[in-house]
Image (cartoon, coloured by chain):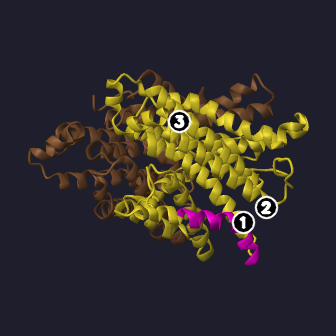
Amino acid sequence: MRESKRQIAVLAVAAALFAALPAIAAAMARPDFVTLGSQVAIMAIAAASLDLLMGRTGLPSFGHAAWLGLGGYTVGVLAFHQADLPWFVTQAWFAWPMAIIVPAVLAAGIGALCLRTSGISFIMITLAFAQMFFFLFIALKAYGGDDGLSMRRRNALPGIAPRDDVAFFYVCLVALVLVLFLLRRIAASRFGAVLDGIRQNEWRMMAIGLSPYPYKLAAFVISAAIAGLAGALHVNLFRFASPDLLHWTMSGELMVMVVLGGLGSLWGAVFGAAAMVLLHSLLAQWTEHWQIVLGPILVAVVLLARRGLWGALGGK
Amino acid sequence: MTLLLEQLLNGLQFGVMLFLMAAGLTLVFGIMGLINLAHGSLYMIGAYAAAWATQQTGSFLLGLGAGLAAAALVGMALEAAILRRLYQRDHLDQVLATFGVILFCNEAVAMIFGRQPLMAGPPPWLSGAVEIVPGVPYPVYRLAIIATGLAVAGGLYLLIAHTRIGMLVRAGATHRDLVGALGVRVGLLFTTVFGLGALLAGLAGALTGPLLAVQVGMGERILITTFVVIVIGGLGSVRGALAGALLVGMVDTLTRAYLPTGLRAMLPPSDADALGAGLSSMAIFILMAVVLLWRPRGLFPAHA
C-alpha cells in the first residue's frame, strides 16, 4: 500500500523524534524517556509480527504473548545457567538467535495444531495454548515461578557497555528497522501475495491450486520468531523475565495495538504500539486504576474508529 | 481407594461448574455468533455480589439471590449497551471490545472491594461432611454443588428440548438467519438467551465463592478453561459443553492429584514435584490438542 503525503510527513517527523530521543531526554533531564522509547521499539516489533498474522493473513491469534514470553525466558534461562554452560550463552550473538529459534520451533508444532481450526476456535485455541505456557512458567519454581527471573546483566554485544541505556535504545531501534524491512519485503513478495489472497478468500486460493495450510503455518512461525526477538529485547531492557510477558492480557494488548494502529499496515502496528505504551505510562502516572480508563477507550476504538490511527491519517 | 473416590467427586464438582459457564458461553456463541470474553466477568460479579450480600445479611440464600441478580442485570445491561452492536462485526472486534469490558470490570471491582480476596465460607447448614460410603467423609457443600449443577443441566435439557423457547434456540443455533426470516423477534430471543447465559455464569460464581477466594482475575482463569471445554465439546453445542466440561473437570482434578505422586516413583521428589505441577497444569491443554487432532471440530459439532 502506498502512503499518502500526510502519512509520509507524520512518519518523517516521528522517525526524527525517535532517533533524537536520547538527546531530547538528556536535554529535559528525563532519562526514563529513553527506557520508554526502547519499550515502544520493542512492542512495535511484537505488534508488527502479529500484524503479519492478523492483518495480512487474516488469522486473529490471541496467544501471541506466548512467543514473546518464550523468547524472553530463553534468554533469561540461558543467563540463569551460565555457570554450567559455555561462556558464549550470555553473548547476544548466541542468545538472541536462540530466542528466535525456540519460539519458532514450538510455533511450528502448536501452529500445526491451531491451524486445523479457524475463526472463533482459532482465537480460543491460541489463547489456551498461550495460557498453557503461562501456567507452566508459573509452576516452574526453579525459574522463579510467580516472581519471575532476573538477569544479572544484559547480553553482551561487542563494543557496547551493558549498562548503557542509550546504546541499548539504539540497538532496539536498529532491530525494529531490520524487522520492518524484513516484513516489508515479505509483504511485497510472492509469499506475501499468497497471504493476502488467503485473507481475502481462502476458497479461491484453493481453487487456483494453492494449498493455504503450509503458507499459514509459515506465517505463524515467522511471526512467532520475530515476537521471540521482541521478548529477548524486553527481558534485556528490564533485566527481568516476568511471567506477565506470557499473560493473556499481553496477547490482548498486542491485538489492541495492531487494531488501534490500523489492521494490515506495518506502520499502523508501529504507531498502535507507540500509542498503547505511551497511553499506558500516562494513565499509570495519573491513577493506579488506569485500566478503568483504558477499558472504555478500547470499546470506543472498536465501535467507532474502524480504520485505526494510521488509516485515519491516510484521509479519504 | 477412598482418595480416588474423593478426587472423582472433586472432578465431577469442577466439571459441573465448568458446564454452567460453558453452557452460557456456547449458547451465546451458537445463537448470536458472539464471542463474549466478558463472560468471566459475569462470573466474578456473581461471586462478589454473593459473598458481599452473604457477609452483610448473614444469609447464604439471600447472597445466592444477590449473585444471580447482579450477574443477570449486569449481563443484560452489557448486552443492551455494547454487545448488541457487535453481533454483525467480525470476531476480532468482538474479542477486543469485550477485552476492554474485562479490564473495566476487573478494575471497577478492585476499586469497590479492594484487592484483598473476600472470604465467605459455606453456610452452617451446608458445612461439615457426610460419609458417602462408610469411612469416606465428603464435604456436604461440594455435594450440594454437584446436585445443583446436575439439576441445572437437566433443567436446561428440558428447556431446550421441550419448550418453544428451546425450539427457537435450537433453530437459531443451526440456522440463525432463517429464524429471523420466519418472523421470530430475534432481538428478544437474543436478550433472553444472553440473560440466561449471564444467570448461569452468576450461579457458577456464587456457588464457587465459598470454595475459593473471591478475587479480581478469578473470571479469566475459569474463562480460559471454559474455552478449552468449548473447543473440546464443539462450538455452539450444549451437549458438547456437558461432555467437555466433565472431561476437563476430571482430567484436571485427577492429574493434579496423582501426577506428582506418580512421578515420585521415578524421579527424586523435588524434580517430581516441579515437573508434576508443570505437567498437570498443562494436562487439559494437551487433552484439547489430542481431541483436535482426532476431531478438529470438537466432539459434538453443532453446525455440521
Q: Which one is nearer the viewer's eye here, B265 or A27?
A: A27
Residue A22 in magenta? yes
Mark seen at residue B80: none
Question: Is A205 located above or below residue A24 in the figure?
Answer: above
Name the spot of residue B140 as percent of width and height, x first.
49, 45
Name the spot of residue B79 as percent of width and height, x first.
31, 59
Task: Note whether residue A30 is visible.
Answer: yes
Dividing the picture into quadrants, the one containing residue A182 is top right
Mark seen at residue A220: 3
Q: Look at label 2 and name its amino acid.
A: Asp
Q: Which chain is brown?
A: B
Residues beneath discs 3 and 2 located on the same chain: yes
Q: CA–CA distance between discs 3 and 2?
A: 32 Å
- Mark 1, residue position: A34
Which region is colored magenta? A11-29
- Which residue is found at the position 64% from the left and 51% from the top? A176
Q: Is residue B190 left or right of residue B280?
A: left
Residue contact at pointers 2 and 1, CB within 8 angstroms: yes
Residue B188 in magenta? no
- The colour assigned to chain A within the rendered structure: yellow
Question: Is A201 located above or below residue A23 in the figure?
Answer: above
User: For numbered disc 2, what is the local secondary structure?
Assistant: helix
Q: Nearer the viewer, mark 1 or mark 3?
A: 1
- Mark 2, residue position: A165
Q: Look at label 1 and name its amino acid.
A: Val
Residues beneath discs 2 and 1 located on the same chain: yes
Q: Residues within 10 Å of mark 2 (few under 14, many from 20)?
A: some
Q: Residues within 10 Å of mark 1 (few under 14, many from 20)?
A: many
Q: Look at label 3 and name its amino acid.
A: Phe
Residue contact at pointers 1 and 3, CB within 8 angstroms: no
| Chain of the residue under the numbered disc 2 shown in the image | A
